[in-house]
Image (spheres, rainbow, N blue to C red):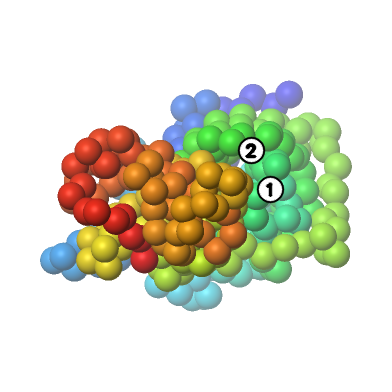
């Protein structure tokens, strides 16, 4: 096995998710030759320019950092191609990378994707897997080609999605599994101990970016669909509803209930709740376990019921 200290990496990434992998490579003695990240973006009420997590880290560790406005700029392409690295590692960079750059490392350009490809190609694989009620998910290391998330698979690891899993818990599992899988893949490629597995295009699904409107709960939908959506949007962006048509409430955790004789006798309307926070949906009921008032802390359903002064509890 080649000494990993001599394996030179060019890293492309932008958010906190990327940073976990960058730090892991750095701490395991891979040589980070340079970092490419998105340019500083306006953030907060003051709309001040803010550097990405990866950008801050690279500067702190005295590593060359590039943040091009246009990845197709010829000078940028020539500069990256001249770096002479073993691999390019791309994790949630957020922009298309020209093939000339992807073809430049000694071995290949690899990507970490948070799904079992070809299922859930695209921007929001964790959330879409939960929204769909998938039984399994995982992490894939693949060779990058020009088509989005369509490259041949190098390594893959799967795990079950549990009842209490949210996008937050899956995010952490994928990071932990993905870090070790990435280094395993890099060493296998160095030692020519790998096979590329072509993705089955017929099984491909697309995980489109989450839109703000999706986080608003529609109580006329099937309770099970709402249940999965709440899991998918916890912690971000958070599923929300209105109490008494006025107060915005985040719903953090629920339990899916099938219609029972007791609940049906109550003749509730859609969005109306029992005094135990069992909410009538288009099909079935959702029992709210925990929630959060706007500007407040997460509370249990019992704490909420004790504090609300409404004869009837309606969500819309």
Q: Above or below — where is 235 with respect to 207?
A: above
Q: Which residue is mark 2?
A: 161
Per the image, label 1 sits on a secondary structure element best described as loop
What x and y, as percent, mark residue 67? 39, 62
Q: Can residue 84 be seen? A: no
Q: Nearer the viewer, residue 22 or 122?
A: 122
Per the image, label 2 sits on a secondary structure element best described as loop
Q: Residue at x 71, y 37 (%)?
A: 158
Q: Earlier in the sequence, mark 2 or mark 1?
A: 1
Disc number for residue 134 = 1
Rounded to the nearest angstrom, the CA distance separating label 2 from label 1 is 7 Å
Q: Residue at x 70, y 41 (%)?
A: 136
**Left or right: 273 as drawn, with respect to 71:** left
Q: Can residue 169 be seen? A: yes
Tell me the quarter of the image containing the C terminus.
Answer: bottom left
- Mark 1 and mark 2 in contact (Cβ < 8 Å)? yes
């Amino acid at each position: 096995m080649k000494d990993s200290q001599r394996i030179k990496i060019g890293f492309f990434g932008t958010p906190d998710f990327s940073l976990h992998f960058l730090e892991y490579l750095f701490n395991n003695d891979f040589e980070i030759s340079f970092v490419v990240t998105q340019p500083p973006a306006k953030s907060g009420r003051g709309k001040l320019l803010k550097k990405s997590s990866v950008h801050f880290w690279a500067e702190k560790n005295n590593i060359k950092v590039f943040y091009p406005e246009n990845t197709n700029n010829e000078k940028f392409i020539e500069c990256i191609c001249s770096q002479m690295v073993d691999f390019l590692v791309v994790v949630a960079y957020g922009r298309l990378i020209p093939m000339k750059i992807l073809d430049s490392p000694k071995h290949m350009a690899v990507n970490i994707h948070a799904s079992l490809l070809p299922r859930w190609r695209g921007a929001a694989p964790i959330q879409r897997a939960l929204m769909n009620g998938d039984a399994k998910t995982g992490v894939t290391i693949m060779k990058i080609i020009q088509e989005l998330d369509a490259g041949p698979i190098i390594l893959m690891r799967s795990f079950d999605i549990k009842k209490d899993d949210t996008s937050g818990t899956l995010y952490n599992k994928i990071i932990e599994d993905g870090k070790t899988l990435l280094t395993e893949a890099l060493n296998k490629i160095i030692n020519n101990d790998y096979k590329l597995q072509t993705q089955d295009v017929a099984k491909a699904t697309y995980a489109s970016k989450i839109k703000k409107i999706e986080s608003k709960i529609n109580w006329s939908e099937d309770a099970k669909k709402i249940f999965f959506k709440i899991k998918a949007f916890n912690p971000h962006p958070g599923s929300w509803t209105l109490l008494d048509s006025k107060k915005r409430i985040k719903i953090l955790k629920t339990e899916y209930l099938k219609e029972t004789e007791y609940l049906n006798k109550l003749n509730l309307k859609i969005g109306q709740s029992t005094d135990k926070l069992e909410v009538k949906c288009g099909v079935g009921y959702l029992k709210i376990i925990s929630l959060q008032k706007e500007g407040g802390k997460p509370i249990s359903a019992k704490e909420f019921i004790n504090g609300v002064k409404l004869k009837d509890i309606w969500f819309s």
